[in-house]
Every structure is written in C-alpha cells, then in structure tokens.
Image (cartoon, rainbow, N blue to C red):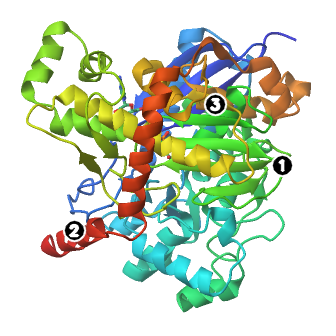
Amino acid sequence: MSQKYAIGVDYGTQSGRAVLVDLSNGNEIADHVTPYPHGVIDEKLPVSGRELEHDWALQHPDDYLEVLRRSVPEVLRQSGVSPDDIIGLGIDFTACTMLPVDEQGVPLCLKPEWKDHPHGWIKLWKHHAAQDEADRLNAIAAERGEKFLPRYGGKISSEWMIAKIWQIVNEAPEVYEATDLFTEATDWVVSQLTGQFVRNSCTAGYKAIWHKQDGYPGNDFFKALDPRLDKLTETKLRGEIKPLGSKAGELTEEMARLIGLNAGTAIAVGNVDAHAAVPAVGVVTPGKLVMAMGTSICHMLLGTEEVAVEGMCGVVEDGIIPGYMGYEAGQSAVGDIFEWFVEEAVPAYAKEAAGKEGVGVHQWLTERASAYKPGETGLLALDWWNGNRSVLVDTNLTGVIVGYSLLTKPEEVYRALLEATAYGTRKIIDAFHSNGVPVEEVYACGGLPQRNALLMQIYADVTNREIKVADSKQTPAVGAAMFGAVAAGSARGGYDSVVDAAKAMARVREESFKPIPENVAVYEKLYREYSELHDYFGRGANDVMKRLKALKDKASK
Ligand SMILES: Nc1ncnc2c1ncn2[C@@H]1O[C@H](COP(=O)(O)OP(=O)(O)O)[C@@H](O)[C@H]1O
Ligand SMILES: O=C(CO)[C@@H](O)[C@@H](O)COP(=O)(O)O
C-alpha cells in the first residue's frame, strides 16, 4: 500500500487551518491558515450593521466553508500528495459554538428572513450574553438536586448550549420556533462534508449536559426552566450521538469537487479543539494534564473514575479518549488578555520602539519583561478579563491589577498579566490534584508555547511542574487528522483506535520547561496573595465587579 495521509482541520476563534499529516509518523507535510473573512462579530451584524449588545460574539457560517475551500486545496497543492492517498479527514472546533438551522440544515442567518436578526447567527463559544439564563439554570438545577450538576463542577456555564438556547427562547421566541435543530458548529460542518447530520459525544457531553448512561436531563427539568423548553431534547436537540473515534460518513461528490479530495474519503465525527490535541501530544493515559494554550486555555486530563471537582468544565466518559473519563477545565481568556494589552494599553513609544527594532510588540514586551525577577514588578493581577471559567465559573467577574505606581512600566504590566494567567492555571491544577484526579505531568500545545518562552517558564515555576511542549505547530489539527485516520480504519491504511494512532503519530519536543527552585519559592508567596484576591472578589466578600457591571449595563441602555 502506498504512503497514506489524513487531513485535520482546526477551527479556532479567528481562523481555521488545514494540516496534511503523514500517517506513518505524524509529520506535518503542509499547512495553511484561512482567517475568517468576518472574524468575530461582536459589534455589528454584517450587511445590516445592526448593533449588538455587550457580551455578544457571533460568527458567519460561510467563513467555516471558506476554510475548507481555501485551505484544503492549498495543502494538497503545497504537498503534491494525491487525493487517492488521503484516506480520512477530521475536524476540531471551538465549542460551544452553536447555531440554529432549518429542516434542510441551512443556518437561519443565511435566510433572507433571519439575516438581520442577531439570534439567527452562530453564537461563538465566547458569547457571554446568556449569563442570566445560566444563573437561573444553576439555581433551578441545584434546587431540584439534579444529579448532573456535580459532573460540571457545580455550575453550567453561560457559554454552553442550554443557556444559549434559553436566551433565544427568552429574547427571540420566533427564532426558536423557526429552528429545526440547534447544532454545534463542529457537527454542522461535518454534515456539510458528509450530507448527513450526526452529533458527537464530546460536545454533547461537555456542552449540552448529555451523559453516556443517563442521556440528557429529564424533560421535567426543561419544563421547570421554562415551559417553552418542553421536549427540547427530543425535538431541536434530536439526532444520533456518535462516540469520538467513529466515522460520521463519507465526503459527498459535491464537497469533493469543491475542496479537491476524493468523494468517499472517510470523515470523522466532529471534535473540540482542545480535546483533539490530547492524543496529538501522546497523552492516552491518566495523570497527564494537557494545556491547549491560545486565545484561552483548556486543561484536559484523563481519569478512571467520575469524581466531582470544583469548577471543572465537565467530566465526560469517552469525552477525550475512548475508555477513560475525560476531565476538562479552562480559563476563558489568556492570549486574549495579552492581545488586549498590546492593542489597547501599550503606550505609543513602546510600539514605535518595537517597530524600529523590527519585532512584534509581544516580543518587545517579553524581552524586557524577562529581565525582571519574580516579585520584582510589585504587581499582581487577577486574570478575569473575560470572566472566570475555572473554580468560580462566573462570566460577570472582571480584571484587576494591584500595585501600580508612577514608575510602572508597560513590560511590568505585561509580565504581571502573564503571571496572572499562570496563577489561574495553578488554581485548576490544585483543584484536580486535591480532589483525587492526580496531575503528575503537564503538556502544552497551541499557539502560545511556540511564541513565548518566558510565559512557559513562568507556568513551570508557578505550578512547580516540568512542562513538555508539543512538537507540532498545529497540535489540534494533527489530533483531528488522527481521528480522520481512525474513521478510515486500518484496512484503508489508517488506524483502528486513536491509541494506536497516537503511538505512531504523536510527538513532543525533547527540551522542556523545568521549574527553577528560587522562582518557585517567590511564586508560592505571590500565589497565596493571588488566592486572597481571588476569594475576596470571587466568592462574595466584595461584589464590586458585579455592581460596576450592572451600572455599566444600565448606563449604556
Ligand atoms: N508572543 C506572544 N506572546 C504571548 N501571546 C501571544 C504572542 N503572540 C500572539 N499571542 C496571543 O496568542 C493568541 C492566539 O493564539 P493561537 O493559539 O494562535 O489562536 P487560537 O486560540 O485562536 O487557536 C492571541 O490571543 C494573541 O494575543
Ligand atoms: O471551550 C473550548 C473547548 O471546550 C474552546 O473551544 C474555547 O476555549 C476556544 O479555544 P481557543 O482558545 O480558540 O483555542
């Protein structure tokens, strides 16, 4: 049999990328990124220019197809590999990124009657305008003693499917009525590739409160939330749920023509970006935490038991690697905080200096921030620029920096922000470790470990753990390609399980980031200070962030 390949397509927050991978060793033969033409829609709807309220974040469905149309032919062209040797394709996506579709699977926002209605559009994972619904959902679930709550760390997030659907019911019942199915974007794109709709167990489990044994919560729960949600799971959330590692179907003739692959190529069921990255760094057993570090961080861990951990995003059987409990936790802004600083808060002189030196502003700040010792800036920050998605699970929390003086430099603030995100990760590791889901090793992948060595050293020092880094530019996409190879199966030159695929294809770099004892000692003290601030602002002692947000919302109405 000739050499075989698979394609992984990773759908991030701002762009999508295709990677063509050699199935014998996991080498990335070619990759190509397509920025989403409409990006993140968070101010105005395209065409009509209709303004969006605070905390909205939408996307355009055609941007996802554009990634397939541009990036798949481009990796074929660059590599020179024949489509006959590409046996499978898998995709991974941000989640819960969800959309309403009609009976033909057409997104409502593409239909003339709904294109100017904000609720007809795709709600991106970081759409945070369903916090009221999430708060009420959590209160009702707790009152009813719903047994699903502990599986989600005690709270369902406003980022997830049910809160987002309920927001539509409340604010646009006509859109709810017109919706045939609510789907994750990952399942919708797969349906466009195969011509048939299936859901995947990963997003159903982590984002839509589905459980392998118990299914969705009972209809009584949905009726208790709102009588209009009666029979939601049998109607607008219906659809077969297939486990990760299964084949969703085969590429249709029409899509094959559009993207340059052969009709009949095996297509894997949809997956989530962070989850797909886990086998790609070779993690297929418990005790190894994988951090997918980019715009946000997702922390992924395998276990053998279903254990309750405060603030985790969820535990789902087979949710990452079949045969294990998959644990997920996360921070909803990490790279996004650094980007905010660079774009909104860096003085002109720093940008000019970076320009003169011919380096990016991140790099300029990082080089200067590296000259400081831990504690030397005198600054301490809380990493809640996009709310808190870890132990506190509250999108109404906001950022804090303590310790400013007239002498504070931009690189010191930048360093304090890098450190704040590391403390956020330490909170998550401590929560798992002290609740019976051990974290013995830490792996990192995503855009940040490639770009910022200082950040990675700070994470090693703050967590007091060695961090191994993926030897891949596009780890989730490589993982998605592995699932594509598993969908094809060994008879066609792929693999029969993702564990087999990981054995042959996963790679980490030889060098790692090791904790430096004197840094660890100082960070231990700073972390204690962070924890004080964290609990003071996050656990009700001072709700000033929420009062400010309420005043802001009132003032801007
Ligand atoms: N040198 C750098 N240091 C720290 N953060 C950076 C640097 N360069 C870019 N970033 C941040 O990386 C993030 C993008 O990460 P990436 O993994 O590429 O994207 P995504 O999370 O969308 O998949 C942006 O939020 C950006 O601010
Ligand atoms: O929430 C999840 C996964 O559960 C992510 O899709 C979301 O944080 C977005 O990830 P990125 O930072 O864009 O890689």
Q: Residue at x 72, y 75 (%)?
A: 147
Inter-mark Cα distance, 3 to 2: 37 Å
Inter-mark Cα distance, 1 to 2: 43 Å
Q: Position of residue 166 (x, y in %)?
A: 49, 76
Kind of residue sitting beneath label 1:
Thr
Q: Position of residue 299 (x, y in %)?
A: 59, 42
Residue labelled with disc 2:
548
User: Which residue in the rendered view is the most extreme toward the right?
Assistant: 491
Inter-mark Cα distance, 3 to 1: 18 Å
Kind of residue sitting beneath label 2:
Leu
Contact check, label 3 and label 2, Cβ < 8 Å: no
Q: Residue at x 79, y 13 (%)?
A: 24
The quadrant of the image that shows the N terminus is top right
Q: Residues within 10 Å of mark 1 (few under 14, many from 20)?
A: few
Q: Earlier in the sequence, mark 3 or mark 1?
A: 1
- The secondary element bearing badge 3 is classed as strand
Q: Is residue 115 above or below residue 529?
A: below
Residue labelled with disc 3:
442
Confirm if mark 3 falls within 8 A of ligand 1: no
Q: Residue at x 25, y 68 (%)?
A: 549
Q: Position of residue 97 (x, y in %)?
A: 50, 54
Residue labelled with disc 1:
304
